[in-house]
Image (spheres, rainbow, N blue to C red):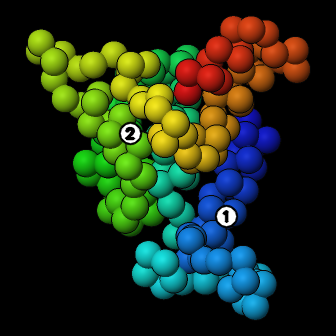
Amino acid sequence: MKKIKSMLLGFAVADALGVPVEFKSRESLKKNPVVDMQGFGTYNQPAGTWSDDTSMTLATMESISRLKKIDYADIMQNFSMWLESGKFTPFGKVFDCGMTCRRAIFNFSTKIFGKNKPPLECGLADENSNGNGLLMRILPAVCYSYKIYGENFSAEAMKIIHEI
């Protein structure tokens, strides 16, 4: 548990270091490297503010911790609460959400025949919908898989990580 908390804290700190300089050029960052928490950059947020990546990681981890299993619908419900009401954010307000994530959450939240679309059918699969944000949010799935399967990740563990 201590290792998981340390990973989540490290994730949030690294994310908060990057938020003010998101979309800055390499040249700009070479001239003014990030060496401490900064505020009021790209998104005009106070120093130490984490992004949607940490919020969605926390939303995923909260579901897994509470249910002691992977439940994709519950995770998507947490994502919906994050996007709609700011849950899992530092200040109760979402200031950024990628278009692919927004569309997947919308796909889940939209009622079809009186029910939500199945979570694993909500994402997009086209070439332009494969940002790196998803890589940052698999940390909870890796932690869960490690706890269940140990160091010898099975095909089932890889399937869970892929689906998250």
Residue 99 in the image: state x and y as whole percent: 38, 49
Nearer to us in this view, 162 or 60: 162
Which of the 4 image quarters holds residue 19? Answer: bottom right
CA gap, disc 2 to disc 1? Answer: 21 Å
Asked if one can make out residue 126 in the rendered structure from this viewpoint, the answer is yes
Q: Quadrant of the N terminus?
A: top right
Q: Amino acid at mark 1?
A: Val
Question: Residue tagged by mark 1?
Answer: 13
- Identified at 47% across, 28% down, the residue is 125
Q: Secondary structure at mark 2?
A: helix
Give how far across and how far down residue 135 sits, in percent: 64, 41
Numbered disc 1: secondary structure? helix
Mark 2, residue position: 79
Question: Residue at 43% of width from left, 19% of height from top?
Answer: 120
Quarter residue 112 falls in? top left
For the residue pair 40 and 61, the one nearer the viewer reads as: 40
Q: Quadrant of the C terminus?
A: top right
Residue 47 as seen in the image, left or right of residue 36: left
